[in-house]
Image (cartoon, grey):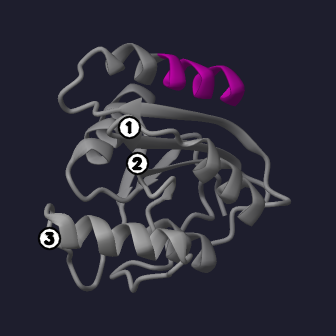
């Protein structure tokens, strides 16, 4: 198997913030972009959506994905992105992590939130990926609306590039 020097950006997005950040990262790093998709789509807004999403993240649920297992063998670097729900990365990331091996890869994390912290979410993912070195992590706050986050996305990409060379 030939290992690609291109990174893979694997992400889940509900409202578009994480998708925006993932696309910016993919463009800046010339990475392949892989969107995780729920088999049963969620509404993008409303109390019920946030309640169910938060509860699924809190209780470590693994919702069914239409693409649960990905072909990541060819990638040396994998960047994982998700929104923050109830202080954790969105539940679809649990499904992705359960079905994909990341050992031996350089892994980076990013999250998007409306202003809450991602520290707990990053700690939990690092624990799930024990044995896999997490090279870096970043939080972007409402990057779709807050264009000031572009500098943070650039800095994140520079860190990935620096580590990869």
Q: Are marks 3 and 1 in contact (CB under 8 Å)?
A: no
Relative to 145, is 95 above or below? below
Quadrant containing the C terminus is top right
Which residue is label 3 attached to?
43
Quarter of the image where one finds residue 5? top right
User: Badge 3, how many Cα within 10 Å: few under 14, some, many 20+?
Assistant: few
83 relative position to 48: left or right: right
Query: On residue 26, which mark appears?
Result: 1
Which residue is denoted by mark 2 in the rendering? 32
How far across and down, in percent of the image, does residue 7 sit? 53, 43
- Asked if one can make out residue 37 in the rendered structure from this viewpoint, the answer is no
**Residue at x 57% of width, y 64% of height:** 72
Residue 152 lies left or right of residue 129; in this view the side is: left
The image position of residue 157, as x and y in percent, is: 50, 25
- Specify few, some or many for label 1: CA neighbours under 10 Å numbering under 14, 14-19, or 20 or more: many
Which is in the foreground here, disc 3 or disc 2? Answer: 3
Distance from the alpha carbon under mark 2 to that under mark 1: 6 Å
Q: Is residue 161 magenta?
A: yes
Residue 109 seen in render: yes
Q: CA distance from mark 3 to mark 1?
A: 26 Å
Q: From what the image shows, is residue 134 above or below residue 59?
A: above
Give the residues in magenta. 155-165
Q: Residue 163, percent across and down?
A: 70, 26
Nearest the eye: 72 or 48: 48
């Amino acid at each position: 198997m030939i290992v690609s020097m291109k990174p893979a950006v694997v992400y889940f997005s509900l409202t578009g913030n994480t998708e925006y950040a993932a696309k910016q990262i993919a463009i800046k790093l010339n990475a392949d972009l892989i969107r995780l998709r729920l088999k049963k789509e969620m509404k993008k807004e409303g109390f019920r959506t946030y309640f169910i999403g938060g509860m699924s993240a809190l209780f470590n649920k693994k919702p069914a994905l239409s693409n649960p297992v990905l072909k990541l063998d060819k990638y040396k670097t994998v960047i994982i992105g998700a929104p923050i729900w109830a202080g954790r990365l969105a539940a679809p990331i649990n499904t992705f992590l359960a079905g994909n091996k990341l050992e031996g890869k350089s892994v980076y994390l990013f999250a998007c939130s409306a202003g809450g912290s991602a520290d707990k979410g990053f700690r939990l993912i690092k624990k799930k990926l024990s044995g896999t070195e997490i090279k870096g992590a970043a939080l972007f706050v409402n990057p779709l609306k807050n264009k000031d986050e572009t500098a943070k996305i650039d800095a994140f990409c520079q860190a990935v590039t620096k580590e990869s060379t």
